[in-house]
Image (cartoon, rainbow, N blue to C red):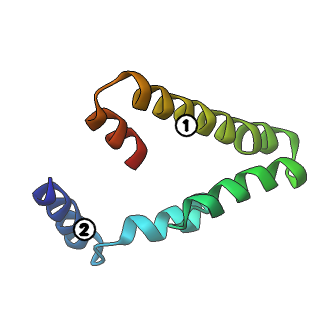
Amino acid sequence: MPLGLVAYLAVNYAVTGDSLAFLHLEREHWFNALTTPWRGIGVSLAVAGYADASQAAMIGMQVPFFLAIGLAGTIAGALFLRPSYAVWMAIN
């Protein structure tokens, strides 16, 4: 796995001259940046209050909905599956 990451960063560097070019593109075109999970959840919930209807439905409602499904799956995994699966789901 680490070799895959190194290869991806090397390809980015060879093509753009910047190993982290994908992060800059995410921020410029889709307004995504690395942040803490709770800040991302808070922003998603805040979008529901001030964005237009389509963005409020997509970001403000669907993102928290699927986060809730993931949390429920992680809890169910902890109860019914092997511990290694529950740890993997929690880390994700």
Residue located at (16% from left, 65% from top): 6
Q: Quadrant of residue 5?
A: bottom left
Residue located at (72% from left, 58% from top): 42
Would you say 73 lies left or right of 68 here? Answer: left
Write down the residue under mark 1. 71
The percent position of residue 58, horizontal first and vertical second, equals 72, 38
Indicate the amino acid at tag 2: Val
**How far apart, in angstroms, are the residues tagged by discs 1 and 2?**
38 Å
Q: Is residue 92 visible?
A: no
Element carrying mark 2: helix
Quick one: which residue is furthest to the left in this view?
3
Local packing at callout 1 (Cα closer than 10 Å; few below 14, some 14-19, many 20+) is some
The percent position of residue 8, horizontal first and vertical second, equals 21, 59
Q: Which mark is residue 15?
A: 2
Quick one: which residue is furthest to the bottom in this view?
17
Q: Quadrant of residue 80?
A: top left
The percent position of residue 29, horizontal first and vertical second, equals 57, 61
Element carrying mark 1: helix
Q: Mark 1 touching mark 2, by CB under 8 A? A: no
Task: Looking at the picture, tell me which residue is in the foreground, 16 or 4.
Answer: 4
Local packing at callout 2 (Cα closer than 10 Å; few below 14, some 14-19, many 20+) is few
Would you say 12 lies left or right of 67 here? Answer: left
Residue located at (28% from left, 28% from top): 82
The percent position of residue 86, horizontal first and vertical second, equals 36, 36
Q: Which mark is residue 88?
A: none
Residue located at (43% from left, 67% from top): 23
First reached walking from the N terminus: tag 1 or tag 2: 2
- Tell me if residue 37 comes above or below residue 20 in the rendering: above
Looking at the rendered structure, the number of numbered marks drawn on it comes to 2
Q: Is residue 90 visible?
A: yes
Indicate the amino acid at tag 1: Leu
